[in-house]
């Protein structure tokens, strides 16, 4: 059975995962209307779906453990970007924020001696290692590419492959 504080904290995470899904959906939509960024758009559409799966997984767990998973209200995410570089910086910043939040949940689970939730959260800990890694790699690549158009072309062409190879399921 979840404690009240644990339940509340998990529901906050539901909201954060839902916000991630919306933020990446907005990135996908912005990318889709830029010339030549269809690979990047595809990457963020997939990323958005994945965040929704993370949200659902949490909701099912909360209910399974005797809590009540709340469907959150959400603020509108950033919908336009100065450019691809600032969008990917935002992507990394967002993932770092999610990792911090997962770490706080793990801390709370230990404090509450809630080992079932602690065990459940390990999946998210591993997931964040992968996501941070892939966001960092993509930012590093963009840094190298700079203003080079052919570099950007290859970045867009290869991005969905990067996503698949970076993920172990
Ligand atoms: Fe939910 O995995 Fe990243 O944010």
Image: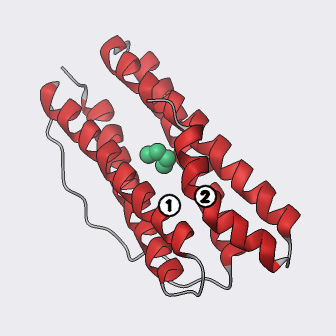
Residue at horizontal 64 percent and vertical 56 percent from the top: 92
The image shows residue 26 at horizontal and vertical percentages of: 44, 75
The image shows residue 141 at horizontal and vertical percentages of: 79, 58
Q: Which residue is mark 1?
A: 43
Q: Which comes sooner in the sequence, label 2 or label 1?
A: 1
Q: State the quadrant of the C terminus.
A: top left
Number of the label disc, if any, that sits on residue 3: none
Secondary structure under tag 2 reads: helix
Beta carbon of the mark 2 residue lies under 8 A of ligand 1: no
Q: State the quadrant of the N terminus.
A: top left
The image shows residue 168 at horizontal and vertical percentages of: 50, 30
Q: Which residue is mark 2?
A: 159
Residue at horizontal 26 percent and vertical 66 percent from the top: 73
Name the image colouring: secondary structure
Crowdedness near tag 2: few (<14), some (14–19) or many (≥20) residues, C-alpha within 10 Å = some
Secondary structure under tag 1 reads: helix
The image shows residue 2 at horizontal and vertical percentages of: 23, 25
Residue 98 in view in this figure: yes
Residue at horizontal 50 percent and vertical 34 percent from the top: 127
Count up the numbered dots: 2
> What's the distance in space between the residues labelled 2 and 1, CA to CA?
7 Å
Q: Which quadrant of the figure has residue 40?
A: bottom right
In the drawing, does residue 138 fall left or right of residue 81? right
Give whichever of 154, 33 is nearer the camera.
Answer: 154
Q: Is residue 76 above or below residue 166?
A: below
Residue at horizontal 70 percent and vertical 64 percent from the top: 155
In the rendered structure, are the residues bearing label 2 and label 1 in contact, judged by CB atoms less than 8 Å apart? yes
Q: Is residue 31 above or below residue 127?
A: below
Residue 108 in view in this figure: no
């Amino acid at each position: 059975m979840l404690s009240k504080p644990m339940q509340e904290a998990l529901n906050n995470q539901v909201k954060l995962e839902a916000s991630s899904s919306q933020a990446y959906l907005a990135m996908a939509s912005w990318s889709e209307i830029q010339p030549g960024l269809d690979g990047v758009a595809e990457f963020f559409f997939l990323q958005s779906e994945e965040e929704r799966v993370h949200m659902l997984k949490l909701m099912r767990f909360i209910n399974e453990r005797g809590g009540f998973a709340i469907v959150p209200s959400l603020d509108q995410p950033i919908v336009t970007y100065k450019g691809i570089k600032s969008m990917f910086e935002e992507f990394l910043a967002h993932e770092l924020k999610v990792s911090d939040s997962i770490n706080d949940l793990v801390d709370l689970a230990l404090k509450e001696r809630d080992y079932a939730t602690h065990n459940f959260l390990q999946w998210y800990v591993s997931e964040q290692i992968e996501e941070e890694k892939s966001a960092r790699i993509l930012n590093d690549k963009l840094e190298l590419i700079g203003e080079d158009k052919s570099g950007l072309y290859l970045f867009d062409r290869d991005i969905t492959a990067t996503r698949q190879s970076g993920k172990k399921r």
